[in-house]
Structures are given as C-alpha cells and as structure tokens.
Image: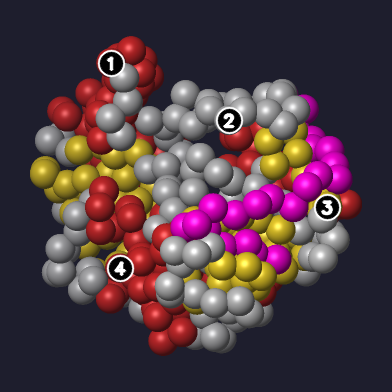
Amino acid sequence: MNKTMKAAQISKYSKQIEAQVNTISIPDIEDHEVLVKVKAAAVNPLEMLIITGSVKLIQDYPFPLTIGNELAGVIEKVGKNVREFQVGDDIYTRLPLKKIGAFAEYVAVDAAAIAPMPKNLSYAEASAVALTGLTAYQGLHEELEAKSGQSVFIPGGSGSFGQIAVPIAKAMGLKVIVSGNAQTRERTLQIGADQYLDYTKENYVDVLTNIDHVIDALGPEEFDNELQIMKRGGRLLSLRTGPNKRFAEDRGFPWWKQKLFGAVGARYDNKAKKKDIQYRFIFVRSDGTQLKEITQIVETNHIVPLLHPQTFTINDINYALELVANGRPKGKVIIQF
C-alpha cells in the first residue's frame, strides 16, 4: 500500500477561505481506531467557521490541520480493540471534534464515532447525512428534550436539515411544522411534516401560536419572531445564532470561557428569559450509537439527501469551499475520491 496520501489542509486560521492540497503520510491507527479509505466527504458551512477561526473558542486546532467533518468510506484496517467492525465494511461518520480531517484519501477514526452506512444510499449521499442527522438527533433529544405530543417548528426547514429532522421528530411523536419554499412542500409533507408554510405566501408569525419548541436554521434576525410564537416554558434551539453561557457550562468550559460566552449570548438569553423560554445553541459531536439510529430512520423513510449536481475531487477543494461559502448550491457539495 502506498504510504502517502493527498489531504486538504490549512496552516493557520485566515479570512481567506482556502486550503492547500498536500501530500502527507497515511495516519497510523490506535487500538480503538479504524483506518478508513474515504470515498466521499461533504463540504459544510462549518468548514468556513473552522478555517476563519470563528469556532476556535469552542474547538481550537493544531496546524497543519486537515479539514473536513463528515465522510463515508470503507474500512481498510481495524485496531486491535475494535470488535464491532471489520475490514471491508461501508461506514459513515461525523468525525470527532478534536480529530477532524475528512478531506483526505484516508482517515484514522475512533470506532465509537462510526456506524454502518445506510443501505439505500451511495457513498456521496451517505457522506451528506451524518452531520445534519446528528444535529437533528442531538437537538431534539438532548437540547430540546422534546416529548411526544409537543409541537416543534422548523423555520427554513425545507433544506437538508429539515429533510432528516422531520422524520426524527415524527419518530419521537412530535407535531412538526415547517416553513420553506413552494418547491419542497410536497416532499416535506411526504416525510411526515404535519403543516407546511410557504414563506412567500404567509408569515409564520401571523399563523402560529403556542409552539413548544423551535429549531432555528435561519439565524439571529428571526430570533424575536420565533419567540413571539412560542409558549411559556418552551425551548428555542439555534444552529446559527451563537453560543451562550449554558452552552459553555454544559461543555464544562473553564470559567473565563463561560464568562465570555455568557456575555456573547446575553442579549438572546435575556430576551428569551422575559418570555420564560430557554435559549440553546448546539455544536454537534460525533456519536456512533446515535448514528445507528439515524441509519434506521434513513432506511425506513427512504431519505436521500439532495446533492449538488457538480462533482468535485480533492484538487477542486477551493472551488467547493467557495461554492458553499458564497454560491447557491442545489444540495450538499461533495468531494469524491
């Protein structure tokens, strides 16, 4: 086996959204890890946050850093303490926060972070599911602690996030309301949404009241509107608006970081508190056990993520990053190996 591989790396945090393709050694694996030959890796907005150093207070990295957070591939080698997987298995993963590096021909990954790939998906499709799947799963179960019979509203939930969040929420017995564009209405209702609002025709603020939970995929400018439609004691989870004190406490960050995040999130916390609503922020982590449940939901509901039609190789990494950062991709952008 060739001992070197190509990897997309950054050598420092920078406002320039770009990576270099370097030739580096194929990583050695530890006893609890597997070596995966990467078949496809998805490019996410999270890459931009990592490259620019925007999340370094949440997760700081040593350099040079191989970037990329989620992938699908085939196991090439198995560490001696790994029982559950063998060479030749098709797997997918959201890589552990401390050890990312999906944009490479091979990656060493903790066996606890991987799961068998959904049988109904190609490598490219599977690589686009782990991050959003775990975000939806952790968001609904851990952050919102949503209970059967409660309602959840996902503004802007017609994209890749909603596509997996809706069936997970339905599996938990929730009433699911989504707003989005007219084109994805039918598909979103088909996968289980109870109500769909076409944002070009109706404003959710005028239509909804008394909602238990909101998962915000749009960002801070919607915060006040979202609070307006919620019932007291509800929870608002944002994927975009930014961390707060609770986020820092839940992760056991040092006191200075708790203070800092407390200051950053204070205006959102205070607005929410006035309405007796809890504001939460999520930064999704790897979890192979949860991924197995997501695999079942994906297979049962025949979920196939939308992919951007253009294919990219690792040599096109900067075009792919640019498209996700500033373009209008028609689905998840994938690097294929």
User: Quadrant where the C terminus lies?
Assistant: bottom right
Q: In this rendering, which labeled residue sits more in front, label 3 or label 1? A: 3
Q: In this rendering, which labeled residue sits more in front, label 1 or label 2? A: 2
Q: In x, y percent, where is residue 98?
A: 51, 40
Q: In x, y percent, where is residue 117?
A: 54, 76
One can see residue 246 in this view: yes
User: Quadrant where the N terminus lies?
Assistant: bottom right
Q: Earlier in the sequence, mark 2 or mark 4?
A: 2
Which residue type carries mark 1? Trp
Q: In this rendering, which labeled residue sits more in front, label 2 or label 3? A: 3
Q: Give the CA separation, mark 1 to mark 2.
A: 20 Å
Q: Residues within 10 Å of mark 2 (few under 14, many from 20)?
A: some
Which residue type carries mark 4? Ala
Q: Which residues are magenta?
A: 15-37
Q: Residues within 10 Å of mark 3 (few under 14, many from 20)?
A: some
**Residue carrying label 1:** 255
**Residue carrying label 2:** 61
Q: Are marks 4 and 1 in contact (CB under 8 Å)?
A: no
Q: In x, y percent, where is residue 249?
A: 25, 29
One can see residue 188 in this view: no
Q: Earlier in the sequence, mark 3 or mark 4?
A: 3
**Residue carrying label 3:** 4
Residue 169, numbered label: 4
Q: Earlier in the sequence, mark 3 or mark 1?
A: 3
Q: Residues within 10 Å of mark 4 (few under 14, many from 20)?
A: many
Is residue 171 or residue 289 the one in the foreground?
289
